[in-house]
Image (cartoon, rainbow, N blue to C red):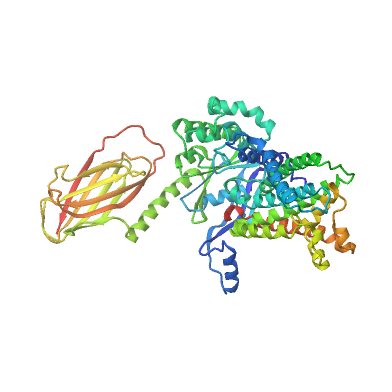
Amino acid sequence: MVDSEAIAIRVENVAKSFRLPHERSTSVKHVFINIFRSKRKFEKQHVLSDISFDVKKGEFFGIVGRNGSGKSTMLKLLAGIYVPDAGTISVKGSLTPFIELGVGFNPELTGRENVFLNGALLGFNRSEMDTMYNDIVDFAELERFMDQKLKNYSSGMQVRLAFSIAIKVNSDILLLDEVLAVGDAAFQKKCFDYFRKLKKDKKTVIFISHDMNAVREYCDRAMLIEKGRILTSGSVDKVAQRYTRLFLNSARASEELGDKTRWGNGQAKLKTVHVIQKADKIIVTLESEFYEDARDPIFGIYIKNPVGIKIFETNTGWERVKIGSIEKDQKVTVKWEIADIFTNGFQTVTAAISSHDGSDYYDWWEEATSFVIDKDKITTAVALPKATVVVDITS
Amino acid sequence: MKHVFTKKNRALLSELVRTDFKLRYQNSILGYSWSLLRPLLLFLILYLVFAKFLKFGADIPHYPIYLLLGIVLWNFFAEMTTQSLGSIVARGDLIRKIRIPRWIIVLSSSVSALINLGLNLIVVAIFMVFNHVSLMETAPLLLLTIVQIYVLALGMSLFLSAAFVKYRDITYIWEVGIQGFFYLTPILYSISRIKDPVLLKMLFLNPMAQAIQDARYALVTHETVTVNNVLHNSIFRLLPYILTIVVLIIGVLYFRRESKYFGENI
């Protein structure tokens, strides 16, 4: 066991649920009505249950999870904004949450006035702010604008100013909630520099993020929350892998629900779309069945990267592969071997069969399947997207 | 109590009050001078209407000051409670994103009201000079009365601001309530007009009635009817003060219970 001296935050069996505003009584009339009703209507939503973990002093601890997993609620519980329904949270040392930058900024006040207001909210008094003021303004590079009202600032300037104040905070423990998500490349670099400084200064940091690259780079340990429970915790690699797998599972689940776009005239159907990942290549296999005769049908796929951009596209027409005449009830399997040109993350495969001239689509299957690329090192070498196609016809 | 006024909390309180004040007279040409000019002009109207045209309070010495002081103290109570009522909800962005003691927000609006009271009392002093009201040795007692009204208003403010987070009709209820309360307090009318002794006694259970009459006694004229003239039993005399304390305790307890859930309820 770790001795308790070295623990900065200890969370034990914490649970939190919210009353969903099914019919919340926000007016006195409802209160009176509800008194006379036998049962009040509200739904309890369990956001977090049975959460326990420790964060050691000087540790950079990541909390990852999908939207709605409860990770932000966890952060607010740690920050003391919410009170847990059950369990205890003990914090050793001063703690500052950054759920948002520039909390309390008022557009009607000048930049200078906002610096002092925001500083006070972060726990600095006037004289402390006076000594830091020039530093803050220098760092934000906003000397000329400090006596203008904040409403005349661009959003980038506001973020810069807020960030310059935030980095002055010298608490023992910092909670960071994806404040990185905003700003341009230059600003992001400043953020990452700040992270490195926090690590060097041995600050305890709780970092909430979607960005697995940032988590891998800065966190010593991490925890994955899904549906209000800890799915896994420990080494960053383990957590990151589990996190990417979550997306794969959810894609399968939604496939079963049949909410993917699929259309076509039904002359032929794709039975399965299958992906096999090899060391340096991806093998995509389409299995189809024809219900009517067809001449030289075209099979095609495209693959979209995690942000939905088409990375790779091919079809048997472009590749000048003649499928030939297919008779009713014949099965056709088409297999592509594609060089692994993909970046880390969640990729989707869309597949289709069309008539020889592309005028009729027999079957179009949007995001028929998906796969996850999770390379430890991102190679810088660019491979040309080369694909080989094998066609197999069976009766 | 030691942790209540830490260095951080004091800094935050003063910054919130400062912001409040800066924003109040934004985009006005006369700026801060409005905080003196506004009561001055309002009092002039009241003086003309009640003292000159309607000739109210002919039986009361220095009636204009008598009236003015009542209005100033009442305005303090009304301003503090109505401003505090919405203060927690108005600062919802802070409460949802940062950990600050919630009561500081209510306290900051109460300090703003106190500052306004100070300015209004300066105007009262100006009127006193013009009306040749001599300063009596009981004048320092006015401070005690102000403390009492502040305590009462703070209790109400804590209760109302916390309740407003959950029930948004509190604002309308209080708007009406404070009007009724105004007429339950002898501000515009002279208390000597109430002849029914039972009604008179009931009226003095209202802490605001007792406080305003006390203030007038201390500052304007000893001919003021106070709680001591009306209630003869010393336990009854304590009732308005006890009521003040009770309101504060209820306010603090309710606020403490509810403030845990401000983050999720706003």
Q: Quadrant of residue A145?
A: top right
Pinpoint residue B69: horizontal percent, then vertical percent: 77, 48
For the point 26% across and 38% down, the residue is: A385
Residue B138 visible: yes
For the point 56% across and 64% down, the residue is: A25
Please, is residue B38 above or below residue B53 in the view? Answer: above
Is A272 displayed left or right of B102 in the figure?
left
For the point 34% across and 60% down, the residue is: A256
Pinpoint residue B221: horizontal percent, then vertical percent: 86, 49
Is B204 displayed left or right of A222 in the figure?
right
Of residue A149 and residue A54, the one placed in the foreground of this image is A149
Report the number of numbered marks.
0
Pinpoint residue A257: horizontal percent, then vertical percent: 34, 61
Q: Quadrant of residue B13?
A: top right
Of residue B50 and residue A291, the one placed in the foreground of this image is B50
Is A85 displayed left or right of B185 in the figure?
left
